[in-house]
Image: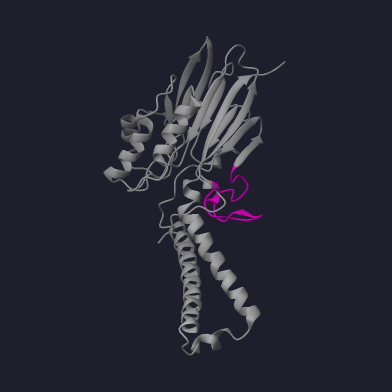
Amino acid sequence: MSYTEFCFFMIRLVTLGSFLTAAFVLSLEALQIYFKFAKQPAFLAKLFRFKTLRILLHSAAAAIVITYVYACFIEPHWLEISRHRIETAKLQNTSYRIVQITDTHCDRRAVLEERLVSEVRRLKPDIVVFTGDACNIGKYAAKQHFRDIFNNIDPPLGIYGCEGNWSFDTRKLFEQAGIDPLFNESRTIEKDGETLQIYGADFQYPNLERLSKLNEASFRLFLYHSPDLIESIPPGSAELYLAGHTHGGQIALPFYGAIITFSKFGKKYEEGMFERAGVQMYVCRGVGLDGGGVIKARFLARPELAVFDIVPKDN
């Protein structure tokens, strides 16, 4: 068992253990109430002699059950759409709307796939980018859910994607889904006579030298699955770096945030917008649920669809 799998296993064990303990305590209380109304000896009363302790115990048990239900059945379906305005002097007379989808982690059962299609259509982007981790498993059903997302959206300037650390015939899957795969490759996109360049890096073997050779006159968008390259890319080699991977922790704590990010920087770039050496980076929480054996839940890390309006700088 790898370290990642061990972490996921422990999270699952603690969560399920807490839920079962809470359910057991509440079942004892229900049983005692039954005996009370049935006028039978309340032999369980000895377990709850102290009223304050009893109240605290049941309050904690109820909170655990409510949290478990919320994290497993509510938050994973509660999509947040974040909007970001990026001003640039490299555009004069046009703008680009880019929607970032990341970490879909499609599985046997669909979760947010249909909602994603309707939301992307409503947002009317010029470009859609996907920043990795398409499926949890290599089964047909999971791949079909992924294909269904991108085959049902049709941005006028195309869909572009890079690979994540969960990989199942990614290039072939991308092509079937209508995604232009960028594995250390770039594309130049033109709108109203002005250009935007997109460079996608291979997850295992990212080539940053090619990124530094993009046309400086164009707005340059860098796609990489994780935020781990932010301190390695040449300064000023891109205007915007889009990443996912961390899920915002997927399970987060109040006032603390992500418990685990699986980034080499830990919590430093766990989610949101950052800037370093002239490059703005956005780390999106993604929309799916990790498939590494972790319980399928989100807590204080809602699924996210990110929208970027790249507009001329107001002089």
Residue 260 painted magenta: yes
Residue 104's image quarter?
top left
Please tell me whether residue 69 is drawn above or below residue 165 in the rendered image. below
Where's the N terminus, which quadrant?
A: bottom left
Residue 277: % across, % down? 66, 32
Outermost residue on the right side: it is 315
**Image: magenta residue range:** 248-271
Q: Is residue 35 above or below residue 180?
A: below
Q: Position of residue 69 (x, y in %)?
A: 48, 59
- The answer to whether residue 256 is visible is yes
- Residue 155 image point, x, y percent: 43, 23
Q: Magenta span has 75?
A: no
Give the color scheme: rainbow, by chain, secondary structure or one colour. one colour
- Secondary structure predominantly adopted by residues drawn in magenta: loop
- Left or right of residue 83, residue 210 in this image: left
Quarter placement of the C terminus: top right
| Residue occupying the point 48% across, 90% down | 41
Residue at position x 57%, y 56% from top? 259
Task: Name the foreground residue: 302 vs 33.
Answer: 33
- Residue 248: image x %, image y %? 55, 47
Q: Residue at x 60, y 15 (%)?
A: 91
Q: How many marks?
A: 0
Residue 212, visible in the rendered structure: no
Q: Nearer the viewer, residue 132 or 18?
A: 18
Q: In the visual, does 271 lie left or right of 112?
A: right
Q: Quadrant of residue 103?
A: top left
Tell me: residue 296, above or below residue 125. Answer: below
Residue at 46 percent of width and 30 percent of height? 120
> Is residue 302 or residue 13 the one in the foreground?
302
